Image: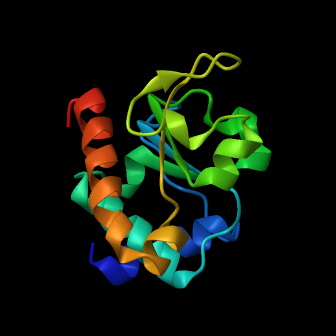
Amino acid sequence: MNESMYAQIIWQIERGLRHPTIRSAKPLLVWLTDSPLNEDEGQLLGKMSQAMRLSADVTKVVHTSSFSDFQTAELVIILGQEAANSLKLNRSESGKVFIHETSQTSMLITYHPRELLTDPLLKRQAWAELQVAMAYLKL
């Protein structure tokens, strides 16, 4: 699957036009966002997934309003401070996997693709955080 196709699938999922194909009832990774991703953000998120060697069938994009939808994932990556705030978390938790007290779900906070597009210098730190996630998931 090329980058353009992957970005289009993410764009469709975000807008409720397509449901992600999940191999099992428990996705490996959930990307948690505070708002729908635009096309550029979706493309960057697709590249982030590819860099982690993840395919679309083991990931899911969920909005913070759908809190219960992600509680079965192996790991939830929270995209940005706004999404973290909705869960009463702060950026000081970033860069490490932690257990969310209420849901008992493993989580990691990193930058939202919107932030990475605005300030490309943040990409190095985001990549380091994604490597922590990869180590946790044994990828």
* In the depicted structure, whether residue 59 falls above or below residue 13: above
Q: Percent x, y for residue 71?
A: 62, 28
Residue 62 seen: no
Q: Indicate the position of residue 39 as horizontal and vertical percent values.
A: 53, 83
Q: In this view, does 133 lie to the left or right of 131?
A: right
How far from the left and from the top, in percent, is residue 38? 60, 79
Nearer to us in this view, 3 or 19 = 3
Q: Which residue is drawn at 27% across and 61% down?
A: 124
The residue located at (39%, 31%) in the rendering is 96
Can see residue 47?
yes
Q: Nearer the viewer, residue 41 or 29?
A: 41
Quarter of the image where the C terminus is located: top left
Residue that extends furthest to the right in the rendered view of this protein: 65
Q: In this view, does 13 lie above or below 137?
A: below
Colour option used: rainbow
Can you tell which quarter of the image residue 119 is in?
Answer: bottom left
Q: In this view, does 93 lie to the left or right of 23?
A: right
Quadrant where the N terminus lies? bottom left
* Count of numbered badges drawn on the protein: 0
Residue 87 pos. (x, y %): 72, 36
Name the residue located 71 percent from the left edge and 18 percent from the top edge.
Answer: 102
Q: Which of 135 and 54 is in front in this view?
A: 135
**Which residue appears at 36% of the width and 75% of the height?**
120
Query: Where 120 sits versus 87, above or below?
Result: below
